[in-house]
Amino acid sequence: MLKKIQQAFRERFNKEPLVIGAPGRVNLIGEHTDYNEGFVLPGAVDKRIYVAIAPNETNTVNVFASQFNESYSFSLDITGPQKGWMNYLLGVSYHIQKQGKKIGGVDLVIDGDIPVGAGMSSSAALCSGYGFALNELFQLGLSRMELAFIGQKTEHTFVGVKCGIMDQFASLHGKKGHVMKLDCRSLEYEYIPFDFPAYKIVLVNSMVSHSLAGSEYNVRRQQCEEGVAILQKHYPEIKSLRDVEPAQLLQHQAELPPVVFDRCSFIVYEKERLLAGCDALKKNDLTTFGKLMFATHEGLSKKYSVSCTELDFLAECAQHITGVAGARMMGGGFGGCTINIVQADAVDVFTKKIQAAFNGLFKITPEVYVTQIEEGTNILS
Ligand code: GAF
């Protein structure tokens, strides 16, 4: 991929680029907790967005996206959203400049092998890779965390998804062989080794294209905020669902609309599961960890209502295949992948069984990605 993008850049722009690789992410447990100021446990993966870039001494960004065979140019003076995937680049350019940082026009080729719409955060990787590239090229001095926030603001203001910070953080801070326990309130984080040579992290794509724009993602966020507003009347110290204990929620159940209660209850117990999951990982106890993953799926499906028939089928099916420690839908939901922890020597049989079962029902073969946890966004050449 590196050679391919260098070649494409030279042919198009007739000069040598700087090349950045920005990975997608998995999240082991702790879903929809980031915008509730809780904890998440993501890792960067071995699939990336590649950004080849060089300055062009103008005020214009010229982009060629190899994957879509599309090119586009925009002025750095644009201050609002335009169209499609270009908004990620527009948003990052805008928010960097809004912070008083000076950038110039660039020529860009973008390519990648993160499946789009699979819930592996290709859009966060695009923002991270492009922001990181501008930071390098123009020596802006932005930290990785600042770049993550620029990506998040881009989602909020140019794409319309009120996402949390997990995806951008993971793409920028990943560490080979480690997952990251991020406290989304204090932004402190801890690297936890994911060192299980006998197991693989296997993603199964439901083939239902996931897009959070236009989904109920923002509605979930509002429902959580509605729950907090009601509970704050009794507990003024509560700032977000991260502060709510299960007993407090249960005590005031009758005051919450049933849907809001369900949403809040998922988040409150998901925090407990994440903390228990981190303890289990540190004790090398994948059996306990896997059970927590199954419970997370149940909650995401029944209480948080962000699953779909295909994801439910994949999670259920995985439970009955030998060698699977845990499985659940991953990420924002409404499509995308399940994440499965599978014994390495059982991966082939797992793949065949789950593909055949899924195909039998939905008449499409789900793609399967066996992933490695890798380094975060970095210069490749
Ligand atoms: C999406 C969002 F972008 C994240 O911020 C996070 O909320 C996730 O869904 C659910 O955990 O990936």
Image (spheres, rainbow, N blue to C red):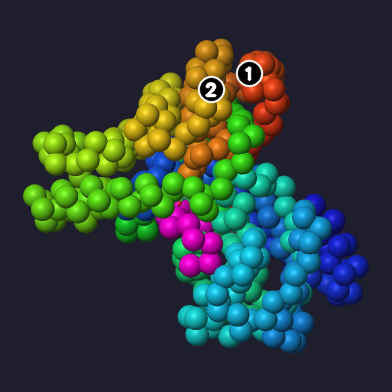
Q: Residue at x 57, y 38 (%)?
A: 336
| Picture coordinates of residue 304, whole percent (x, y) | 37, 37
Q: Earlier in the sequence, mark 1 or mark 2?
A: 2
Instruction: Name above or below for residue 291 compared with residue 218.
Output: above
Q: Secondary structure at mark 1?
A: helix
Q: Which mark is residue 238?
A: none
Q: Secondary structure at mark 2?
A: helix
Q: Are marks 1 and 2 in contact (CB under 8 Å)?
A: yes
| Picture coordinates of residue 325, whole percent (x, y) | 49, 21
Q: Which residue is at the far left?
A: 234
| Picture coordinates of residue 193, whole percent (x, y) | 49, 40
Image quadrant occupied by the C terminus: bottom right
In front of the other: 53 or 200: 53
Q: Amino acid at mark 2?
A: Phe
Residue 232 makes an appearance in the image: yes
Describe residue 73's horizontal placement relative to residue 147 as left or right: right
Circle 1 crowding by C-alpha within 10 Å: few under 14, some 14–19, many from 20: few
In front of the other: 16 or 270: 270
Q: Residue at x 86, y 73 (%)?
A: 13
In front of the other: 311 or 46: 311
Describe residue 78's horizontal placement relative to residue 214 as left or right: right
Circle 2 crowding by C-alpha within 10 Å: few under 14, some 14–19, many from 20: some
| Picture coordinates of residue 79, whole percent (x, y) | 55, 79
Callout count? 2
Q: Amino acid at mark 1?
A: Leu
Q: CA distance from mark 1 to mark 2?
A: 9 Å
Q: Which mark is residue 313?
A: 2
Q: Which mark is residue 361?
A: 1
Q: Residue at x 43, y 21 (%)?
A: 287
Q: Quadrant of residue 136?
A: bottom right
- Residues rendered magenta in the picture: 157-169
